[in-house]
Image (tube, rainbow, N blue to C red):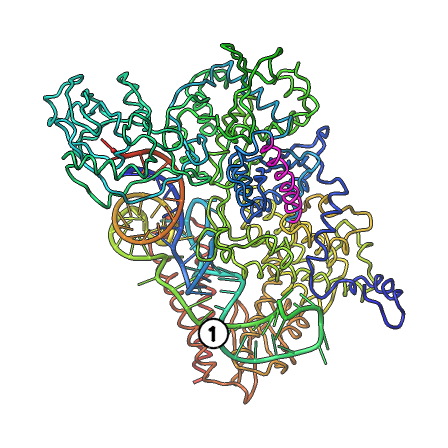
Amino acid sequence: MWICPLFGVHCATFFARLGAQMLDKAYDPKATEDDIYAMWEKSGAFIADNTSTKEPFTISMPPPNATGQLHLGHAVMLALEDIFIRFARMQGKEALWVPGTDHAAIATENVVIKKLKDEGMKDPRKELGREALIAKIADFVEKSQDTIRSQVRKMGSSCDWSREAYTFEPALNRLVNEVFAKMYADGLIYRGHRIVNWDPKLQTTVSDDEIEWKEETVPFYTFQYGPFQIGTSRPETKFGDKYVVMHPEDERYAKYKHGDTFDAEWINGPVRATVIKDTAVDPAFGTGVMTITPWHDNADFDIAERHGLEKEQVIDYDGKLLPIAGEFAGQHIEKARPLIVEKLAAKGLLVKTEENYVHNKAVNQRGGGTIEPQIKLQWFIDVNKPVVEWKGQKMSLKEVMHDVVHHGDITIIPERFNKTYFHWIDNLRDWCISRQIWWGHRVPVWYKGEETCVGAQPPKGAGWEQDSDTLDTWFSSGLWTWSTLIDKKLTEDFSLSLQDLLSGSADYKKFHPTTVMETGYDILFFWVARMILMTTYATGQIPFKTVYLHGLVRTRDGKKMSKSDPKTMIDPLDIIPKYGADALRLSMIVGQSPGADSKLFEEKIAGYRNFINKLWNASRFVLLQCEKAEVDPANVPQEAVAPKSLADKALCHELSLLRDDVTSGLEASRLSEVGERIYAFVWDYFCDWYLELSKGEANPELLVQSIRRILVLLHPYCPFVTEELWKQFKHADADMLLRQPWPQDNAQFPKESAQLSTVIAVITALRSIRADQELEAGKEIPVAIYSAEHAELIQSQSEHIQRLARVGELTVGAKPKKHEQAASAFLPGIEIHVPLEGLIDFEKERARLLKEQENLSKFVQGIEAKLSNEQFVSKAPPALIEEQKSKLAEAEDKLKKITERLSSLS
RNA sequence: GGGCAAUUAGCUCAGCUGGUUAGAGCGCCACAUUGACAUUGUGGAGGUCACAAGUUCGAAUCUUGUAUUGCCCACCA
């Protein structure tokens, strides 16, 4: 607080009454945002009411991983969702935004293990054991959740904290187990030996979608194998090979029949091999013959399954060779590979080596371990079994997933992602849901001797052991939209069925299906598709009606922002104190279209900070006007006051149009466009024209109401600054801004709005002449304006024109008079002359007019060509032809005047 | 190999169902400045809408092809 040297702290009270004096010269987000958020939260305005009769509008916040910091991706998500939610709330809907965090199984366990290793522990899993490690991870998660909570608040997110959820809380565990049990009972979950993606580094399986392919260049070897030559880049898998496979129609090998056997000298001595004919082999690749390793290759596994071939494990789960490798047993495959080649070469079996063979290596996205396919006993979800009740039919999970998007139950924005989604479904294989890590929901299956029990609750009696595996993290996040709406108390009662839990939960009944799922396109498969799969199955409802996919935020150069390169990173937590959350929000929304990546850099953010400051100062100006007129904004009525001047009416009209555009734009999810529209309105129309005009004749009540309207419309985008300013402008009886109803009225002054545009055009033309003629900025100029149509209007607005264009003597008439010593401009139906004897630079004037003449003649020629084209006249819509005609008339008139003017100048 | 997208002013991007003398912000140039705001104001320069062909009375916009860039999916021993 500033303490007045004369009056001490009493000064503060004195200034408080002056209102405007209390607004600083610039908006300071740091000093306001946290307080505003606290005020909102305390008011309970974010808390949705499941008993209300209002139309529900629900968003499930994609839960950030509970591993630490929020990044720009989260910031984009929070900004978008908050706009949707605030708009819905102001439109009078029962808006619910459920926040939460994800336990992010592998990611979180990795982070903690890495941390423990950095602290000196060699093998945390072994040293701590399951219980102790889980406790450590739980601790870490709790801290990280605190961080996330505060960061979500920093962005201004108006989410319902009373309903905050966590994917690994007991209530959700219950639901995970219920769904697992139901799927098991329906035969959708099965346990089986299948080839899976094994990560030897993290000692766990991962799903197909968690794999990343990295290109690498390796040698490609061709070996002699009996009468055949076979190619491989992985000789270390070849120990157990005893089948050669070729295409049944490959002429070269026609003499070999399916099932023929032959003996071949191989790495560790002679082997007997069998010929297999299978269409999976591409005759054009290499020699057209290959040996197979069913245990360590997907395609080979399938071939082996088709022909009932034996499968043998060659590589163990640590990536080392098994006894089958003979002298190489126990060696790591990477080390053994060259030695194996050496041995084969020594035996004369190496035919050739091609260096620079490019192939793709599978690595785990999380942790980077090289994936080794292995056959393992794992839990799977069958995506092809037609047992799901959907729309009165039995469908497979795949079919349901396809159906809901295909038939428009779910709309994806942008639409083109439908194709990607369908393609993914078409290629979807059974989903491996078990993981060998410790952090996550345990597979709810118990064993005792030969007995197996599956259920949400451990079976009664002693001696039961639970499955040691955990579930893929996406299994639980697949339930997110509805599991978070189930009454937590009910989940403690194990006598209730899944159906009971659903039908007994008021939140679920009111708020599900959710309205919009807004998330990054990068997790369309991981998450969005799996929510559709799990939710349609478990609840019989779609999880959400609309999927809005945002893109990645990149650096100015289009690179991904990465933690490893801090220079490229923009941290929302650095930006917010400096520029404010509102500016950050705008910079990520405007210029961003759904599904497309966007580039963010500091100048962009600064630009929106400037905009917010502009709004701040416009408000400050309005408060000063109120003060001058002794109008207390708190007493300015909420219902519309009558506009007085032409500008007032035009403004009212434009504000209504703005309201229409913002409303329809937001309803169509065109967030960028709407942001731009408001930005341009506030700056270019309201500040640059209306406020400037109002300096002549202010209408404080209307000014206050206009600011109120702007604050309401801008609130979803910039909640903090608008709420802060609202305090200054709100009616004494009005509630906080975030609770204000969305305005509804009709535009009613189109004529006045058009008239004001004419006045603005006159002022702009005069300013242009001034700048062109390099007239001294402060100098008042004489001006003559002639217009048959607009003379009266111009006369009535002469004070504005004089002030804003620095005009001294202004002559207005209907009939043009000649001005020789003048610079001139011609608007539709209006002639403007600045008669400045001796001050006009005729060279400049001529150059300017010549240029305009040239442009205009081109334009006129263009239209004339069009209008004399019979095809155009007969086929173009009549309205367009009329428009062209009037444009032509206008342009011709102007051209004529310019030409006259030019001839009188020379 | 298959698919998707992008290509518009120096930079970042709008331009929805084909009819605009192609727009914005930043940057640039000139001028202004004790008055809501220099986180400012006024005026201005700057684009053969990647290229080619086609459809059409009319194409930045639709079709086809080419090029460049990016992403996704598949993965062949």
Q: Position of residue B5 (x, y in %)?
A: 40, 46
Q: Which residue is mark 1?
A: A897
Region in magenta: A132-154
Q: Residues within 10 Å of mark 1 (few under 14, many from 20)?
A: some
Q: Secondary structure at mark 1?
A: helix
What is the quadrant of residue A803 in the picture? bottom right
Would residue A125 be found to the left or right of residue A628 on screen?
left
Q: Position of residue A675 (x, y in %)?
A: 58, 52
Q: Is residue A689 visible?
A: no
Chain to which the residue tagged by mark 1 belongs:
A
| Residue located farthest toward the bottom when viewing the structure as drawn | A838
What is the quadrant of residue A784 in the picture? bottom right
Residue sitting nearer the eye, A723 or A101: A101
Would residue A790 be found to the left or right of residue A631 on screen?
left
Residue sitting nearer the eye, A439 or A899: A439
What is the quadrant of residue A67 in the picture? top right
Residue A147 forms part of the magenta stretch: yes
Asked if residue A838 is positioned above or below residue A115 in the image, the reply reads: below
Q: Where is the C terminus of chain A found, in terms of image quarters?
A: bottom left
Q: Where is the N terminus of chain A found, in terms of image quarters?
A: bottom right
What secondary structure characterizes most of the magenta part?
helix
Q: Mark 1: which amino acid?
A: Lys
Asked if residue A773 is positioned above or below residue B74 in the image, the reply reads: below
Q: Position of residue A391 (x, y in %)?
A: 50, 19
Q: Position of residue A566 (x, y in %)?
A: 51, 55
Q: Is residue A560 visible?
A: yes
Q: How many numbered circles are shown? A: 1
